[in-house]
Amino acid sequence: MLTLTDNAVMAIRDLTVGENIPDQAGLRLASKPGEEASLELSLVSAPQAGDQVIEKADTRVFVEAGVAPALDDKTLDADIGAEGGHTFKLMRQ
């Protein structure tokens, strides 16, 4: 199962906290349409049917069912920019 670093948790928390963001919101990893072996990240209000839900602290990551097996040995990390920009990256465990 995909694991999350503390930096990834902080970055996801930054993105999912706000007045108009539902409590169950999270970051979703899914295959990028038309681009084999590419992933896209998006902020969503809830998981889609079949998504694997990963929770750490008070954050959630939703992984598309077809992508989940390829991420089983990966860790999601993030670089947190000084001006609020975040860069996510996948690393081998």
Image (spheres, grey):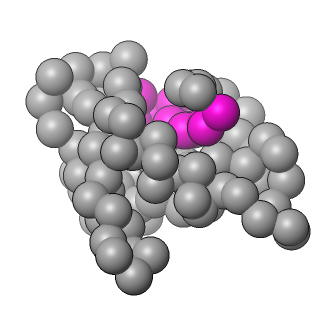
Q: Is residue 8 visible?
A: yes
Query: Residue 22 location, x and y as percent?
Result: 85, 53
Residue 53 in the image: x percent, y percent? 60, 27
The quadrant holding residue 56 is: top right
Identify which residue is drawn at 65% across, 33% down.
58
Q: Residue furthest front?
A: 82
Work out whether 71 lies above or below 18: above
Q: Is residue 44 above or below residue 90?
A: below
Asked where in the image residue 79 lies, by quadrant, the reply is bottom left
As rendered, which of 40 and 81 lies closer to the eye? 81
Task: Looking at the picture, tell me which residue is in the foreground, 17 or 48.
Answer: 17
Determine whether, in the image, residue 90 is placed left or right of residue 22: left
User: Measuring 33% from the left and 76% from the top, which residue is drawn there?
Assistant: 82
Instruction: Please identify the quadrant where the C terminus is shown.
Output: top left
Residue visible at 44% across and 33% down?
Answer: 66
At 57% from the left edge and 59% from the top edge, which residue is drawn? 14
What residue occupies the far left of the structure in this picture? 92
Residue 76 image position (x, y, % from top left):
31, 40
Residue placed furthest toward the bottom: 83
Q: Is residue 5 above or below residue 25?
A: above
Q: Picture quarter containing residue 40? A: bottom left
Q: Is residue 61 left or right of residue 48?
A: left
Asked if residue 62 lies in the magenta stretch, the reply is: yes
Where in the figure is residue 92, as x and y percent of width and height? 13, 30
- Magenta stretch, residue numbers: 58-68
Residue 34 in view: no
In the rendered view of the protein, which quadrant contains the N terminus?
A: top left
Magenta stretch encompasses residue 11: no
